[in-house]
Amino acid sequence: MTLEEAARQLYALPPQQFTAARDALATEAKAAGDAALATSVRALRRASASAWAVDLLAREAPDDLVALVALGGRFRTAQADGDRAALSALTRERKEALAGLVARARLLASDAGRPLSAAALAEVDQTLRAAVADAAAAAAVRSGRLVRALAADGLEEADLTDAVAGPAPAGVAPERLRAAAAPAGDDHDEKGGGATGSASGGGSRTRDREAARQAAAEAARRAAEQAAVDAEREADDAEAALAEVDERATRLAHDRDDVLDQLRRLRDEFAAAERRSAELDDREKFLTREHRRADADAAAARQAADRARAALG
């Protein structure tokens, strides 16, 4: 396993799974005897929400990103040529392409169970605009290993410092991914140290100070790394708790919808029963009237028969 392969595997995961998976890969690499790879893997940082969504696009919609990169090339050519008509047409095309990709990123993130906030969607749009404006930013976007959002206005190159995990993608100069080294401070011998013994003592003290400084810096770096790991784990736990709450809220909403559906059905059934009851009441009243009329007719017929028999006797 290479660092690039590990990074591709990790940044394909939902953010809440990143830290545990990264630590597992680092442990696996160390167990395999590759301590350098283990250290490099453990140093990988979790992607921001917007960068993770752009990485989703790199995996799920690579052809659309290729089209966006090609559009960026044509856009930069039109800018260099000062072709206003072409720029006007390309601006409209860029607007449509960006809107489509941002919408696709939003859908992919939702399908993955990690809906994007409005701020994250704005950063997705900003990053894709940087890919149009800067060819190196486009390569970073297509790598699928983006760690943070990018920005470029077409006048200056995008800042790619620490923006891509693992080795530099093709088309990106490695130095653009690294922060500039801080200039080393000049060490001076103590005043009046013209003698050889004094110069030697001063050099020794300088080396001791440098060693102490490096040791302190290393301790601070390790403490910062541990703090970052702890913070990531806390963030993972918080996001896992949030995901659980979201899932419970979704289930509750579904249960509520089911109850409302049942209530609507019961109301419909009750209304139908009331209508049926009213119909039966009407029929009962009609039959009661018919019964009374029939009874009266029968009584009258009986009286007529009695009178007829009396007349015969």
Image: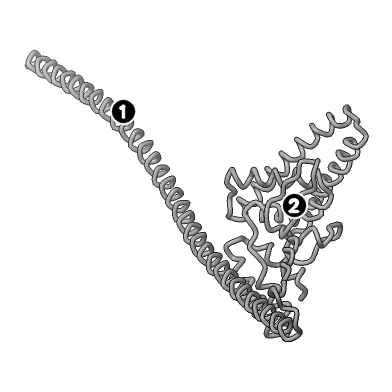
Residue 296 on image: x %, y %: 15, 19
Q: In the rendering, at what x and y percent does residue 276 appear? A: 33, 32
Dot 2: element: loop
Gap in angstroms between the C-alphas marked 2 and 1: 79 Å
- Whether 96 is drawn above or below 258: the answer is above
Query: Eyeballing the image, is 272 above or below 109?
Result: above
Residue 279 numbered mark, or none: 1
Quarter location, residue 223: bottom right
Percent of width and height locating residue 189: 71, 75
Picture layout, residue 91 above or below residue 57: above
What residue is rendered at 65% in x and 47% in y? 107
In terms of depth relative to the viewer, which is nearer, 308 or 28? 28
Q: Amino acid at mark 2?
A: Asp
Q: Amino acid at mark 1?
A: Glu
Describe residue 1's horizontal placement relative to residue 226 as left or right: right
Q: Are marks 2 and 1 in contact (CB under 8 Å)?
A: no
Which residue is disc 2 drawn over? Answer: 159
- Secondary element at image label 1: helix
Front residue of 279 and 216 = 216
Q: Residue at x 68, y 47 (%)?
A: 124
Q: Looking at the image, which is closer to me, 198 or 214?
A: 198
On the image, which quarter does residue 6 sit in? bottom right
> Which quadrant of the rendered structure holds the C terminus?
top left
At 79% across and 37% down in the image, what residue appears?
94
Q: Position of residue 292 (x, y in %)?
A: 17, 22
For the N terminus, the quadrant is bottom right
Local crowd at mark 1 within 10 Å, few (<14), some, or many (≥20)?
A: few
Q: Nearer the viewer, mark 2 or mark 1?
A: 2
Upstream in sequence: badge 2 or badge 1: 2
Residue 289 relative to residue 1: left or right: left
- Taking the view exactly as shown, the residue that stands out farthest to the right is 81
